[in-house]
Amino acid sequence: MSLFVQQILNGLTLGSVYALVALGLTLVYGILHIPNFSHGALFTVGAYAAYVTAGQLGANYWVALGAAALVTALVAMLSERLVFSRLRDSPPLHDMIAAIGLLLFFEALIQAKFGAEFHRVAAPYPGIWQGLRQATGLVLPIQRALIIAGAVILMVALHLFLTRTVTGSTIVAMAQNREGASLVGIDLTRVSLLTFAISGALAAVAAVLFAPINLVSPGMGNLVILKAFVIIILGGMGSVPGAIAGGMIIGFAESFGAFYISTDLKDIMAFALLVVILSVRPQGLFPAPAR
Amino acid sequence: MSARAAVAAVALAAAIAFPLVSPNDYFTYVMALAFIYAIAAIGLNLILGYTGQLNLAHAGFMAIGAYALGILTVDYGVPFWLAFLASGLVAALAGLGAGLVSLRLKADYFAIFTLCVGIIIWLGIEKWDSLTHGVVGIIGIPAPAPIGPLRFDTTISKYYLVLVFLVLGLFVMDRIVHSILGRAFVAIRNGEGLAESLGIPLMRTKVTAFVLSTAYAGYAGALYAGFVQFIGPQIASETYAFDMIAFILVGGLGTLSGPVLGAIVLTWATQSLQFLQDYRLLVFGPLLILLVMFLPKGIVGTLRAQQARRAGRRATAARAEAAVAGTADKASAHA
């Protein structure tokens, strides 16, 4: 029984990381209307920014987290200005290919600067919750608890921002109908910069929270971003609750799959799940209402 | 002889003469590899350029073809050409399965889904040790077996074999895209709703395009396996699919010769970037972005657009001249 609960805790951790990455991706989808393949590179950039500030400059973990979010938000805004805003009138295929180009560039840049080897970001509070362990026999390292708590806080904050503030509503409006939003005076450039900044920051926070339990390397974003794609397809592209639910589904599928089926199949699980679900329901689990 | 046939004849003559003028075997080897990737890219262009669906699993299907040949010849001792024939069919069969599921999805969903299919193929090859030899790969794949007096044990002879397949592949693709089926593909690219309203069976036509394109990938993979004689799981990696997309973009999306031209130009461009080694992608990524920004139609597409503009101008000029002549005639009749 406690093994079962342990898998739930592990699934929750993984799911939180995936959901944060997928949230940024789904927000940007509302602006670009294409899957942003370079989003995985933002995840990696965030992790390396933290590695430099915490590992090499010796800053506090939380300072590194903030710095990583800031740097990654800037990088995301820069990519919007230099690449995506210029391709706004091109066919979607060209945006996708440009996104792939960005992904290759960031990955190569990081590899050239830091090498292909793995790096470590130290956890701020190494150790596990002794009280919990004594009471229930469950192991919950503090870093995993931080991931879950951080994800929940960010999700609630994002939800409040999107639904309760005017600035947040402009993002939602732009995603619903670009022309309509422009007609009522919403500035497309501002909204799309803001959206890219938020998505970059979310990816960076996910990466930095995840880094202490999962080493930092140039290719670290690849599988995570692919899973984030699976998640936003499952949850419906552009849907915020869908991204959270999808993230949890994949997180649980992986932790239970690794435990009850085989660790070899852990990484394949998400993709196989997508294939199975889309074979049965091509519209995804939570189809967006027709516009 | 039309201008198009003349260009094709000159290109073919150049390709035949290449090994004779190339300073060493290595250049011939690189060129043959470019041709093999060109064959795969021709196939990808059918689904991407003509039918308008971004398939990111193309390298995976190429790997399936390569592994089918490798496993059949090395582990089961099947004669080379029999295995070769089978490898394309295996890839096409896998394509049929993947296509039936994935083509129910539209645009972005399709692209992401195929990306996942590619990853599944890659991870599948890596983990299924007993069939694929896992990360070790398959070593000692036999060279293409002799056909009559023709033997394929040197780089130059293999180069000509690949060239024959490239020409064959181009010829077949030319037949396909100029057939009624090819027009159906283009109609789907231009608008699925419109194509369907013309009575084109959407699903069946898209699956046909997908299966044909994966058959190309499979044969290209089998040629690769017979040419390099060693394969590993990384040939299924999505970076190779990205490479092929770049070939098509550079050459020209939805043009017959575009993928071939792109494959040759980019292969030699990356060869000359060889001194950059790991930094190759640092140049390659921005290159892709600049291409879609400033040369979205590719080399062939841009040339063709210029030609069309010139022809259009000539036609307008001729019409204006005729109009002037017409008024002059009328004027003289009045006089």
Image (tube, coloured by chain):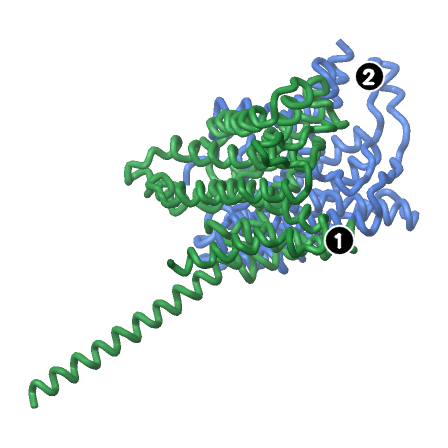
Chain colours: A blue, B green
Residue holding disc 1: B274
- Give neighbour class at mark 1: few <14, some 14-19, many 20+ (Cα, 10 Å): few
Report whether mark 1 lies on the same chain as mark 2. no
Q: Position of residue B301 (x, y in %)?
A: 47, 58
Counting the numbered discs, the total is 2
Q: Chain of mark 1?
A: B
Q: Secondary structure at mark 1?
A: helix
Q: Quadrant of the N terminus of chain A?
A: top right
Q: Secondary structure at mark 2?
A: loop
Residue B21 against residue A60 in the figure, above or below:
below
Q: Quadrant of the C terminus of chain A?
A: top left
- Left or right: where A32 falls relative to B142: left
Q: Which mark is residue A138?
A: 2
- Give neighbour class at mark 2: few <14, some 14-19, many 20+ (Cα, 10 Å): many
Instruction: Tell me if I can see residue A20 in this picture.
Output: no
Q: Give the image quarter of residue A140.
A: top right
Q: Position of residue A268 (x, y in %)?
A: 66, 25
- Which amino acid does the dot numbered 1 rest on? Gln
Outermost residue toward the front in this view: B149
Residue B314 against residue B119 in the figure, above or below:
below
How much space separates mark 1 and mark 2, taking CA atoms? 53 Å
Q: Chain of mark 2?
A: A
Q: Give the image quarter of residue A179.
A: bottom left
- Left or right: where A181 falls relative to A248: left
Q: Which mark is residue B230?
A: none
Outermost residue toward the left in this view: B334
Residue B10 against residue B148 in the figure, above or below:
below
Asked whether the residues under the numbered discs 1 and 2 touch, taking CB atoms below 8 Å apart as contact, a structural biologist would say no
* Mark 1 or 2, closer to the camera: 1
Rendered residue at 46%/37% (across/down): B106
